[in-house]
Each structure stands twice: as C-alpha cells, then as structure tokens.
Image (tube, helix red, strand yellow):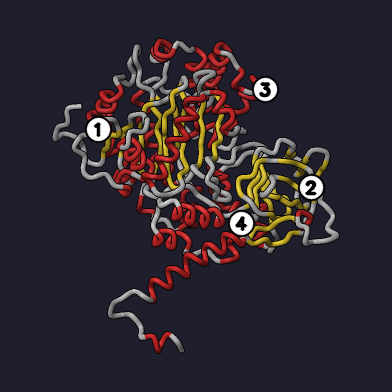
Amino acid sequence: MNATHHWPKHFYLVASGQTPPHHKPTRENMGSKAHNLLRMAAIGLPVPAALVVGTHFTRAPEDCMLPLFSVGLPALESATGMVFGDPRQPLIVSVRSGAPVSMPGMMETLLNVGLCEATLPGLLRQTGNPRLVWDAYRRLIASYGEVVAGLPGALFEDEIQRTTQGQDERLLDFSELRELSKRFLAIYRENAGEDFPQDVRAQLSGAVHAVFASWHLPKATSYRSMHGIDDAMGTAVTIQRMVFGNAGCHCGAGVGFTRDPTGGHNTIWVDFLANAQGEDVVAGQRNAHGHEVLAQTAPDAWNELQAIALRLEQEFQDMQDFEFTVEDGALYMLQTRSGQRTPQAAARIALDMLDEGLISAEQALERTQALQDSDLTTQRLVAQHADQPGAAPATPVAQALSACNGVVSGEIALDAQRVQERADAGVAVVLVRQDTQTTDIAALNAAVGLLTQRGARTSHAAVVARQMNRVCLVACSALQIDEAHRSVRLGEHAFAEGDVITLDGNDGRVYAGPVTTVAVADEDLLARLAALRQSANHATQHKPGKHAQPAATTAL
C-alpha cells in the first residue's frame, strides 16, 4: 500500500509489509487482541490481514464509518488482493471486538461478513467448495440475525435441529445447507420485518455498530464491575480476512494454551474441531476434541503449532491462550493473550519459566506475590488417599471433561435466578446447564461449580470459570436436563433441582450427594515458592545502599 498522509487517526493495519503512517499503536488505542495480532505478524507468524478500528470510536461509532469505507477498507483490500463485495474475488471478513483488557466472550463477534447472493458464486469460484459456501452463508444469516437484528438465537437453532434430527450438522451436504440458508432468510424476514441485507457495506456497517454496542451488554458490564475494569476504556473492532476452518477434511478450528492452565505443567493444551469455525469451539455449544484429532486432520499444521507455541512464550514471556484456524492444511493464528489459570498453575508456570530463563526472579515474584499456601492446596476425594483408612470409594454417576480442578458439592440449580436465591441463603450451588454460556457470568460468580452437557475446556465460559477458580466440568454426555419438570438425569440416576451433587474437577467425574474430601497440599510447589521468596528477602536484606539496616538491629 502506498502510505499517504490521508491515513485516518485511530485506524490500524495488520498486514505483512504494510505500514501506513498510523500514530503509535498501543493496547489502549487498538485493544489488546489487535495489538497482539500486530506483534505476531511482526515476528513472522501466519496472521490473516486485518483492519483495526480503534477504541476511540466506542463513544460514537458513526464517526468511524466514513474513514472506514473511504480509506480503511481499500487498504485491507490492497493487503489481501481481494475486493469487498466483488462478485468474482470477494473479500469475506470477520468482525471482532477487543478491549485493552481481555474480557473472554463478553462481547460480540461476527464471521463471514460480505457473503450475499452476489458474492456466493465468487466464494465458490475461489474455493471450489459448495458446502463451505452455503455453510458460511447460513452461519452469517443466523449470527447477524441474533447479534445485529436482535433475534432470538433459538429461532435458528431450532431450525437446525429440525433439519438434522439430532445428527451432527457437519454431516449436512451442500444442498441441505443451501435449503437451510433459504429457510434462515425466511426466518430473518419474518421476525426482523425486513430482508437480510444483501448490500455488503450495510452488513459491515451493521456488524461494526453491533460490536461497538456489545461493550454495553449486561454480561460485559457485569464482568467489568467484577474485575474493576474502567467503563471508559472502550473496545476496538478488528475486521480481518476470513480463513475457513469449515472447508473440508483438512480444515478445522481450535483454541489452545501453551501450557496446562489447570495444573501449569509444560504441555500444550488444545481443543480442536475438524471442519468447523472458531465460534463452534469458544461459544460452548459444541464438544471439541484434543490435539490428537488435529494431528490426524492436518499433521503439518500440528507440528507448526507446537513450534509457534514456543515462539509465543518467548515473545510474550507468559503462558498464552491462542485461537487458530486450519484451512486446507495451512495454519493461521487469529489471537493470542496471556491465559487465565488456576492459582496452582500460576505458581508452577512462574517458577518453571524462571528455571527456563524466560522470566526474571523479579517477574516470578510479582506473578506469585498474591498466592497463599492455601491456594496451592487442592481438594481431593478421601477414598483416593491411602492415609484415610476405611474410606469407601464413591461411585461416579457421570464422566465429563474438566476445565478447572478441585472438588465441590452443592445443590443443583438450573438457572441464574435459582443460583442467586440459594447462594443468598448461604447454600452452596452447582449451576447445571446444557451449554457453557458467558451470559451466566453473575450466576457463575455466585455458584461453587458449573456442569454442562455440551462445550469445550477452552470455551469462553470455561475460561472465565477457570479465572474465578470455579470447578467446571463440560461435555457431560450422560447429562439430560428437563427444564419443564426442573430435574436432570445423569445416566441412570434422576435428580430434582435442589438435590446435591459433587463435581470432581481432578478426574472429571460427577457424584450423587456430598462426598468427603481432604485438602492435599502440593509440597514440592510450596517448597519452590518458599525458596524463591527466601532468596528475594535475602537479596533485599543484603542490598547495599543508604536504606540497609545495621546488623545489630536485624539480629534482635
């Protein structure tokens, strides 16, 4: 791109070799997500080109529209070699939020923006994949209907259920997806009172407005209130070239951590869905698989991802939570940020990174200074320990995937109101849901644990649960919820709302009733942390300077 003085303020381009003269990009003015994209691109990682509309416009989104279409979008088109709305070589984009401080899943994202009746043939020409084209289009209609037009997502989910009859929607062929897209268009028209927008600029404008508006969503304001985040901070909006994880057998989308965020061990931790888009993993409505499926689907991408995980830790000097897409075997990085972790993981990661030379002793101290000995103690079932004689082994009623360790017991509650009522009465409560949803943020704060039928360990809600150190079990296939009768089944066992269950986040098991637990300290971790603090105190006491205390006073 030929940079000129006409490049607008508060706009930023993330693209290899493309450097328009924007004022200094910072986390504050372009958001943490986009700033990290810029850093990944700068060290040569595969990042799709993106245009960032800065946090400045949160207060008045309309002010960004003229420069967006007159300068920003043409710059993105130049960087990608595609044209937005072009019938032959269309640029299709995602529109994502991104505040200066990470707020996982609290704001909106739209994928596949720019698809319409005019551009569908162009995407088909580019990809040669009719199934991808119709899958992407039906996703856009549904998400745009929900996020921009304010329609209930259940309208589209129910139609999917009618079409699939309980089967995996990824098994639908292109003709079934084409028919589903047509029904989605009719649902949109009937419930929104107008047609789904076929003008791609109207689509983009609506998406950008909606993402800025999501800064004010109740779940976002609750999250900021809970974490002391300034409401005036605002969010940026990132408009990025789409890469398609739903393009066939060598494709998929995933979320990962460079280390285990529950225990802190130095092993890459990945959730992956073949032939899917990123929202399928993070939205909490689909069950994901581990890295083994990625290794089978795209072995070269898996090898590259492991190497990239090491580079991310070297660049950011912390454990990273990243999102990626594999399109026709090629890996693309879409996001990275410092990952939410349990207190135990925080200690182990800081100490290991110190030993590995990634961070200094001062940094390790800073990252662990708030940790108490009790934080490095995990609740475990009594029957699992030889030093507890006579303990009868409890029998689990269901198995799930664990997103956060520990053991908790509590009454079953099926909605946020019930959680709050019982928690206010001083009762421990386990929130039981079909999906992991970030709209449950306030209820999750009041509950001691979360159990869901569907979802992934890396979904936004699971990430938030881990940050709150709430025991969280997801993808419990044995769980069936009967909202009408306020009851649940776990395999062969029936429970009413208010019955007590126990979640074992260490082994991913669910038990009927309360289970006796014992607190088990991680002695090795405690010893390493004590040695770090003792070493720091020793260094401080013997540091030369005018503030050094005479030996006589310290020996009293």
Disc 2, SS: strand
Residues at marks 3 and 4, CA–CA distance in whole angstroms: 35 Å
Mark closer to the chain start, 3 or 2: 3
- Mark nearer the N terminus (4 vs 1): 1
Q: Position of residue 103 (x, y in %)?
A: 45, 47
The disc labelled 4 sits on which kind of residue? Answer: Ala
**What residue sits right under mark 1 in the picture?**
66
Residue 167: give its label.
3
**What distance separates the C-alpha of mark 2 from that of mark 1?**
56 Å
Give the spatial CA distance, label 4 vs label 1: 44 Å
Residue type pointed to by label 1: Leu
Disc 3, disc 2: CB below 8 Å?
Answer: no
User: Which residue position is annotated with label 4?
Assistant: 446
Give the mark nearest the N terminus, 3 or 4. 3
Nearer mark to the viewer, of 3 and 2? 3
Whole-number angstrom distance, CA of label 3 to CA of label 1: 45 Å
Mark closer to the observer (4, 1): 4
Position in image of residue 506 (x %, y %) = 67, 49
Disc 4 is placed on an element classified as helix
Observer-nearest residue: 435 or 367? 367
